[in-house]
Image: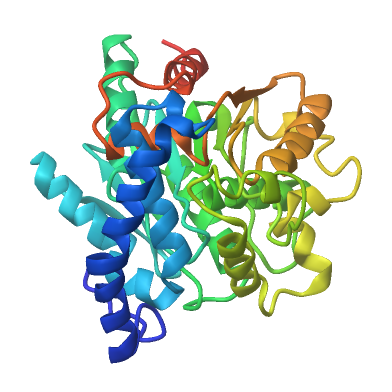
C-alpha cells in the first residue's frame, strides 16, 4: 500500500542541503584522516581494526554535525531502507499493515512458530539504519543452523515529528496483538530493540504494568518469551557521568543526545515521562516484569555515553526479575555489535555470540 510522506519529516531547506553536501565533501575527510592518524594513541580506538575506527567516527560525525531534518532527508524512512535492503538480498517484500500508519516488515517469510519482533533505534527521529538488517540476518542464519529457524518482523513506527506520544506505544501493541492473532504463541515471541527501540520496549512493558488510559493492551495468555535490549535509551535528559567522560569515545555524543531528547520529549506530559525515561521511574516500577516477559537480556558498551544510566536501570531490572541478565562490553560503543556489519568485519565482537545463544535458548524445539 502506498503512503504519503509527511512533509514535516525530512524537509530541510536548500541551505541545509548544501551544508550537508559541504560537510561530507570537505570536513568529513579531514576528520577521518586525523582519526586514523591518532587512533594508535586513543585508549579505545587502538583496540579496534582501522575500519571500525573509521566507521565509528563516521557515525559520530554525521550525528554531531547534521541536524535532524538533514539526517531524515539523507536517510529516508524505514520502509525505504527495508525496500532497498531486501532488493539487494534478493528477498521478497513481505509487509503486514497494522493500522495507525504502522506495519510489520518481514525478513524472509512470515512465521508463526518462532518470531523476533524488532523495534529499531534512531532516537524516534531516524529510520532503521541500512546495516542493521545485516546483523539480524546473521543471527537468523545462525539460528537456522541450530534447527531454530525464526521469523523476523521489523516494526515500522511513526517518527518524530509526524506523530505525538503515545502513538508509538499503540503501534507496538498493534504489532504484538497482530502476531498473537496470526497464531504466534506469546512464549514464542521475543521482542528486541536497540537505543530508542529499547526505550520503546521498556515503554511497552511499563504500559502493561501500569496501563495508560485510552491506550490498548494486547491479550497475553502467557508471558512473552523474552526481551533483548541493546544499549537502551533509558534517559532522554541525562547530563553527567559517562555522558561526559565518554563523549569522545562513543559513536553518539552528549550534545547530540540532549538535542534529540528535547525533540522527543516536546509535548509529553510531565506525569508520563517515566514511560519514556526508565531511569526516572519510581522504585519498584518493574517489580512484576516477570509476569509479562520470561527472560530479559540487556547489553551496553563500556565506552558509550549512556553507560552509567543503562547500568542503573539494568541493575534494577535484574533485582526485580530472576530471569534478567546484564552484560557490559569492554571498549564497546553504543549499539556496538551493529558496527562490525557496517565495516564488514570478519571477527565479530564479544556480544554477538552472547546475543545469538540467548535467542537460541529462548526458543523451544
Q: Nearer the viewer, residue 119 or 249?
A: 249
Image quadrant where residue 55 sits:
top left
Q: Quadrant of the C terminus?
A: top left
Answer above or below: position of 100 versus 45. Answer: below
Q: Position of residue 329 (x, y in %)?
A: 57, 25
Measuring 12% from the left and 40% from the top, which residue is drawn there? 89
Q: Position of residue 187 (x, y in %)?
A: 55, 26
Measuring 55% from the left and 63% from the top, which residue is drawn there? 256
Furthest residue in direction right, as rendered: 283
Answer above or below: position of 301 versus 78. Answer: above
Answer above or below: position of 305 versus 171. Answer: above
- Identify the coloring: rainbow
Answer above or below: position of 92 versus 320. Answer: below
Measuring 35% from the left and 78% from the top, which residue is drawn there? 10
Q: Position of residue 296 (x, y in %)?
A: 63, 27
Q: Position of residue 112 (x, y in %)?
A: 36, 32
Amino acid at each position: 500500500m502506498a503512503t504519503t510522506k509527511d512533509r514535516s519529516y525530512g524537509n530541510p531547506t536548500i541551505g541545509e542541503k548544501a551544508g550537508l553536501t559541504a560537510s561530507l565533501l570537505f570536513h568529513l575527510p579531514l576528520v577521518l584522516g586525523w582519526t586514523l592518524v591518532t587512533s594508535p594513541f586513543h585508549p579505545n580506538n587502538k583496540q579496534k581494526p582501522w575500519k571500525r575506527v573509521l566507521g565509528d567516527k563516521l557515525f559520530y560525525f554525521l550525528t554531531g554535525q547534521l541536524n535532524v531534518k538533514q539526517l531524515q532527508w539523507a536517510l529516508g524512512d524505514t520502509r525505504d531502507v527495508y525496500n532497498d535492503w531486501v532488493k539487494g538480498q534478493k528477498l521478497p517484500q513481505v509487509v503486514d499493515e497494522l493500522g495507525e500508519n504502522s506495519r510489520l516488515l518481514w525478513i524472509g517469510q512470515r512465521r508463526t512458530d518462532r518470531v523476533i519482533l524488532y523495534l529499531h533505534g534512531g532516537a524516534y527521529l531516524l529510520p532503521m539504519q541500512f546495516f542493521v538488517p545485516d546483523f539480524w540476518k546473521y543471527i537468523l542464519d545462525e539460528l537456522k543452523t541450530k534447527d531454530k529457524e525464526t521469523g523476523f518482523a521489523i516494526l515500522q513506527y511513526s517518527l518524530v515529528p509526524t506523530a505525538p506520544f503515545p502513538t508509538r506505544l499503540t503501534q507496538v501493541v498493534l504489532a504484538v496483538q497482530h502476531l498473537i492473532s496470526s497464531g504466534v504463541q506469546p512464549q514464542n515471541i521475543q521482542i528486541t530493540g536497540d537505543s530508542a527501540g529499547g526505550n520503546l520496549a521498556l515503554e511497552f512493558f511499563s504500559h502493561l504494568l501500569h496501563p495508560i488510559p485510552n491506550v490498548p493492551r494486547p491479550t497475553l495468555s502467557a508471558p512473552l518469551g523474552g526481551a533483548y535490549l541493546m544499549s537502551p535509551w533509558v534517559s532522554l535528559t541525562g547530563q553527567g557521568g559517562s555522558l561526559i567522560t565518554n563523549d569522545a569515545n562513543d559513536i553518539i555524543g552528549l550534545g547530540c543526545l540532549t538535542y534529540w531528547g528535547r525533540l522527543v520529549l516536546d509535548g509529553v506530559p510531565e506525569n508520563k515521562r517515566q514511560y519514556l525515561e526508565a531511569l526516572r521511574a519510581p522504585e519498584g516500577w518493574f517489580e512484576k516484569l516477570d509476569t509479562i516477559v520470561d527472560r530479559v537480556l540487556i547489553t551496553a558498551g563500556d565506552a558509550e555515553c549512556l553507560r552509567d544510566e543503562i547500568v542503573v536501570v539494568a541493575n534494577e531490572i535484574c533485582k526485580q526479575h530472576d530471569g534478567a541478565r546484564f552484560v557490559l562490553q569492554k571498549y564497546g560503543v553504543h549499539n556496538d555489535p551493529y558496527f562490525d556489519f557496517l565495516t564488514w568485519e570478519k571477527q565479530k565482537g564479544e556480544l554477538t555470540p552472547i546475543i545469538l545463544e540467548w535467542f537460541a535458548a529462548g526458543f523451544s524445539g
